[in-house]
Image (cartoon, helix red, strand yellow):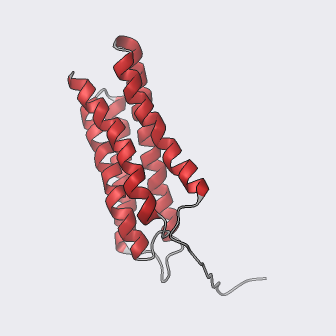
Amino acid sequence: MQQDGRRITVTERPGVPWLAVLFGYGPMLPLLAGAAGVWWWRGETGGTIQQVTLLWASAILLFLSGVRRGLSFRTEGGETLAQIATVLALFGLGFLALLAQAFGYTVPALVLLILGFAAIAVLDPIAAARGEAPLFFARLRPLQMPLGILGLAALLTLHYA
């Protein structure tokens, strides 16, 4: 049986669901742990920890670009130009950071990742207010993303120490 359309009604609460807390803050912890590991273990071990941490951060940023794309499929009236631009920008930052790290450009990779995480901290609350993301993103992202930024900034600082 073919359907001509579908109507979806969603009721949201502004509170952050417990799974969003777990899967929101949990992935930020390896970034903080990675910075602590690089500080604790210098040399080759610290370098390996740094590489793994940057790969993890890139994976998270790429994943979050996909989250934004998935949300755009459910936007009333269809995806907006702002949503597509955000998806492409986040994906581009994540992929360029991955490439930079692969070719040994650690500082540019860190800067790209910090920019990506900062963009999410700013743009997701705006998207939530516009109905382009769940309401709880307005509360989650401004607290979640700074944890990742802190870990990445610490790695950047340690790079010059």
Whether residue 8 sits left or right of residue 71 in the image: it is right
Instruction: Name the one closer to the observer, 77 or 16.
Output: 16
- Identify the residue at the far bottom of this view: 4
Q: Quadrant of the C terminus?
A: top left
User: What residue is at 39 percent from the left and 70 percent from the top?
Assistant: 127
Whether residue 96 sits left or right of residue 18 in the image: it is left
- Identify the residue at the far right of this view: 1
Residue 105, by quadrant, is: top left
Whether residue 107 sits left or right of residue 32 in the image: it is left
Instruction: Name the one closer to the observer, 144 or 107.
Output: 144
Q: From where the camera sits, is residue 152 visible?
A: yes
- Identify the residue at the far top of this view: 43
Residue 87, by quadrant, is: bottom left
- Residue 79: x %, y % from top left: 45, 74
Number of callouts: 0
Q: Is residue 144 above or below residue 59?
A: below
Q: Quadrant of the N terminus?
A: bottom right
Q: Is residue 48 above or below residue 147?
A: above
Q: Is residue 130 above or below residue 5?
A: above
Q: Is residue 145 above or below residue 131?
A: above
User: What residue is at 34 percent from the left and 63 percent from the top?
Assistant: 123
User: What residue is at 32 percent from the left and 28 percent from the top?
Assistant: 103
Q: From where the camera sits, is residue 109 visible?
A: no
- Residue 96: x %, y % from top left: 33, 43
- Residue 98: x %, y % from top left: 38, 38
- Identify the residue at the far front of this view: 15
Instruction: Name the one closer to the observer, 80 or 38.
Output: 38
User: What residue is at 45 percent from the left and 42 percent from the top?
Assistant: 28
- Residue 139: x %, y % from top left: 43, 62
